[in-house]
Amino acid sequence: MDKAQQNPLIRPFLYSDELRHRDGVINLPLIAAAACAQGKSDEYFHDPEAIHLLRTCRIFDPEWFEEAYNRTIARCYSEGLFDV
C-alpha cells in the first residue's frame, strides 16, 4: 500500500479517505487495475505472497473487487494511460 501511495501514476486512483484496516481491501483492486493499465503490475504482484493477498481480497467481496477494478480500468483508459 505504501509503495502505491508513493507512486504518482497510481496515487490518483486510490481511495483517499483513511479507513485504517480497510484501506488495503478497498484499494487493492484500484492498485491492481492502475498498475495493469500502466504495464507495471509486476512491481506489485511479483511474488506468490502478493498473489495470495490479491486472491484473498477478491474472495472477500468478489462483486466489489470486480466493480472497483473495472471502473478503475475505465478511468485509466479515459485518462490515456493505455498504450494502444
Image: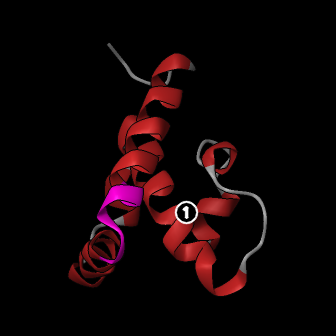
> In terms of depth relative to the viewer, which is nearer, 10 or 53?
53
Residue 38 seen anywhere in this rendered image of the structure: no
Q: In this view, does 79 lie to the left or right of 5?
A: left
Q: Give the range drawn in magenta.
A: 60-65
Magenta stretch: residue 64 in it? yes
Q: In which quarter of the image is the C terminus?
A: top left
Is residue 15 among what the camera can see? yes
Quick check: 44 above or below 40? below
The residue located at (40%, 46%) in the rendering is 67
| Quadrant position of the N terminus in the picture | bottom right
Residue 71 in the image, given as x and y percentages of width and height: 46, 37
Please state which amino acid type lies under the numbered disc 1: Asn
Residue 16: image location, x then y, percent: 75, 58
- The residue to which callout 1 is attached is 27
Q: Residue at x 67, y 61 (%)?
A: 5
Tally of marks: 1
Identify the secondary structure beneath mark 1: helix
Q: In this view, does 82 lie above or below 5?
A: above
Depth check, front residue: 72 or 7: 72
Prevailing secondary structure class for the magenta stretch in the rendered image: helix
Drawn side of residue 22 relative to residue 38, left or right: right
Q: Residue at x 46, y 49 (%)?
A: 68
x and y percentages locating residue 50 in the rendered image: 32, 77
Residue 10 horizontal side relative to residue 54, left or right: right
Q: In the rendered image, which quarter is residue 13 located in?
A: top right
